[in-house]
DNA sequence: AAAATTAATAACAACGTTGTTATTTTTATG
DNA sequence: CATAAAAATAACAACGTTGTTATTAATTTT
């Protein structure tokens, strides 16, 4: 029983096609009648019928986000940010937590205008005719859709350089290694590349997983290293939080004794025990770029670019100059 | 350019209304023509147009799930399970991570048939005319929608009884206390009630939060208790995992020295360091109940019941008989 | 002030379904 | 074997929009 443009038309003494034009701000309708129609529409509590609109326009202005792995906090934050980013566009976003395949199928039914996928799900087959962008690793290059990726190598470069400038020479990396997780690999390799380039020594500490506790445990290994590092790069928010806690418990001041930089640039870094200096593409930028890209892809026949976003370093309190004693001893 | 029922009609030499009926298995169409139509439809790759269907039927067969706080793993698991539960119905589910208000508005635009809300968001105003069910605490009773809740008191009762039967007399509870989180409060109060009823001593250990680390830290307090407990009830998956780790690190065997039962009945309990005995409504049951309820609410004019689900105890390895020395010393 | 031009509005056919009513075909009945 | 009854199919009007074409009203132009 909801109010339709025909109801408005009757009330405002115009034809319903005029109402339609007025509601869409067509230049074909006189300003004064438009205003009247708008007023009546508001008074009657008009809500456009999406299904009808969709039926004739063949557009939904909805994009689907597929997020099959509800787990890591970074992704959760990214999802929230993407959702926020859509708010300022004329598109809406819906979310699915099904497998990529199932989700794509149901999004196709809904006739979404586009899809966003977290490319954790390898070798997925994009739905014919529905624009898609992926966020993730741009490894295998022969893709038919845009990929948004972070420049992990540059991130490591920036982080190490930053620590180097603070006087650090023994810089460890704590994270998952020798896995088939392409993202983690890019991080480690980025770290190793920079360290070599700068003539420093690699201090690789492999964790068992990506959780808080894996970082917490890794600190033991860090402290048993021949060269005790003066700085640590933690490979993710969770890992770094664990590292931070363990360091505190073992009586190391951060950053007075040991500096810590975390990968991932999310707001939560502000509220750890000691606000963490971090490196990575800020989530809000990332989110913005993702929604821009899918919208471009929907509205124009955009090419299939791989966009590498530049990370930035956010200075907080967990990283500082190398302590005096270490300067002399090294 | 997708294929419509009219295309099928032409191909199969019938009228399009017959096609419609055939596709909906109407008894009004002869079996053989129905089969032919179905075959042709399949051959042509027919996909029904949801918008058109929705326009005439005024139903979307979609329910929206509002999940404004992407954080706790239990909720994430619940969401996944709800999504799975919908798979075996004719309804689809879409998810929003916006604020309850925003999400409701956009779901209203999509004309979902129903909504599911996690009642973290207090005093929300349900959308007129759209069925809604909430999962959460049934505290204030004057609601106009069904609430699915777990019987927390009975959960504690079962857990304590189970430990009692194993010989435990000193049973501690570790969790958030004195907060305005109604759910947490129900848990503590449940615990305290049972303990009193059974003539045991309350051993309340308050944590600072609900994270892994809060459980980890709480173990210190547990061990400094006058009466060292032989069993602990952890208030959530994260808390209990932290407790488990801390106990191990401090050299306590689980369950040989100390037994542990965790609140929350999710599959992840199976894969902790030591598979955890846990208490709570199994997530899959919970999910099933939630989707049943919303569907009932959509399809019939159901009353606004508050459903309290019965928890069950899943026996694993973290809880066992009280150790010998404690039996004598108590 | 009539004709030509432009501006404003109205009419109406889509869009792809469903559901109701009208028509045709088949089967049963006397 | 006509005729009534039942079964199967076809026709067509919704549903609430948009966009195109037709009509009317208001301006210019001469």
Image: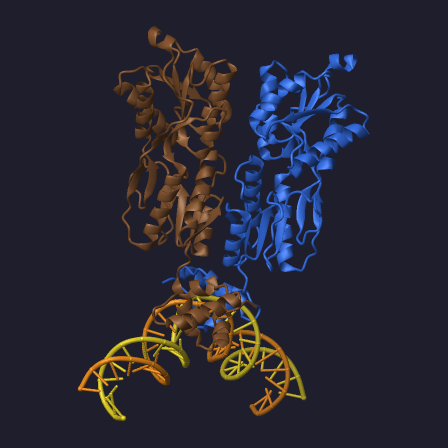
Chain colours: A brown, B blue, C yellow, D orange
Q: Who's the residue at 40% across and 49% down the image? A: A115
Q: Which image quarter holds the N terminus of chain B?
A: bottom left
Residue positioned most to the top = A329
Question: Is C20 situated above or below A163?
Answer: below
Total marks drawn? 0
Of A270 and B232, the residue lying toward us: A270
Say whether residue B183 is left or right of residue B213. right
Say whether residue A139 is left or right of residue B9. left
When asked about the image quadrant of residue A22, the answer is: bottom left
Residue B57: x, y in percent? 54, 66
Question: Is A314 situated above or below B30?
Answer: above
Q: Which image quarter holds the C terminus of chain B?
A: top right
Say whether residue B58 is left or right of residue A131. right
Of A195 and A287, the residue lying toward us: A287
Residue A105: x, y in percent? 45, 51
When asked about the image quadrant of residue B278, the answer is: top right
Asked if residue B34 can be seen in this view, the reply is no
Of D24 and B314, the residue lying toward us: D24
Residue A176: x, y in percent? 42, 25
When asked about the image quadrant of residue D23, the answer is: bottom left
Asked if residue B215 can be seen in this view, the reply is yes
Residue A242: x, y in percent? 49, 23
């Amino acid at each position: 029983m909801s109010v339709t443009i025909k109801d408005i038309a009757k009330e405002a003494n115009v034809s319903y096609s005029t109402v339609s034009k007025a509601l869409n701000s067509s230049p074909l309708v006189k300003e004064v009648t438009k205003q009247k129609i708008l007023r009546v529409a508001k008074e009657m509590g008009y809500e456009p019928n999406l299904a009808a609109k969709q039926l004739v326009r063949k557009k939904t202005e909805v994009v689907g986000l597929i997020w099959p792995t509800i787990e890591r906090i970074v992704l959760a934050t990214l999802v929230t940010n993407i959702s926020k980013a859509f708010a300022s566009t004329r598109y809406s976003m819906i979310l699915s937590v099904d497998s990529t395949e199932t989700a794509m199928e149901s999004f196709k039914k809904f006739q979404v205008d586009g899809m966003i996928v977290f490319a954790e799900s390898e070798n997925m087959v994009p739905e014919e005719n529905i624009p898609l962008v992926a966020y993730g690793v741009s490894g295998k290059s022969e893709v038919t859709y845009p990929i948004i990726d972070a420049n992990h190598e540059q991130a490591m470069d920036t982080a190490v350089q930053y620590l180097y400038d603070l006087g650090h020479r023994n810089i460890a990396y704590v994270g998952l290694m020798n896995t088939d997780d392409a993202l983690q690999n890019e991080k480690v390799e980025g770290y190793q590349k920079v360290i070599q380039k700068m003539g420093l020594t690699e201090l690789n500490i492999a964790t068992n997983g990506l959780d808080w506790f894996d970082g917490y445990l890794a600190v033991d290994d860090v402290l048993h290293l021949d060269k005790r590092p003066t700085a640590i790069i933690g490979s993710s928010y969770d890992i770094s939080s664990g590292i931070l806690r363990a360091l505190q418990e073992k009586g190391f001041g951060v950053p007075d004794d040991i500096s810590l930089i975390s990968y991932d640039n999310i707001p939560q870094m502000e509220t750890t025990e000691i606000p963490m200096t971090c490196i990575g593409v800020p989530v809000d930028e990332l989110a913005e770029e993702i929604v821009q890209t899918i919208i471009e892809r929907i509205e124009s026949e955009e090419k299939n670019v791989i966009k590498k976003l530049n990370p930035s370093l956010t200075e907080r309190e967990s990283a500082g100059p190398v302590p005096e004693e270490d300067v002399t001893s090294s």
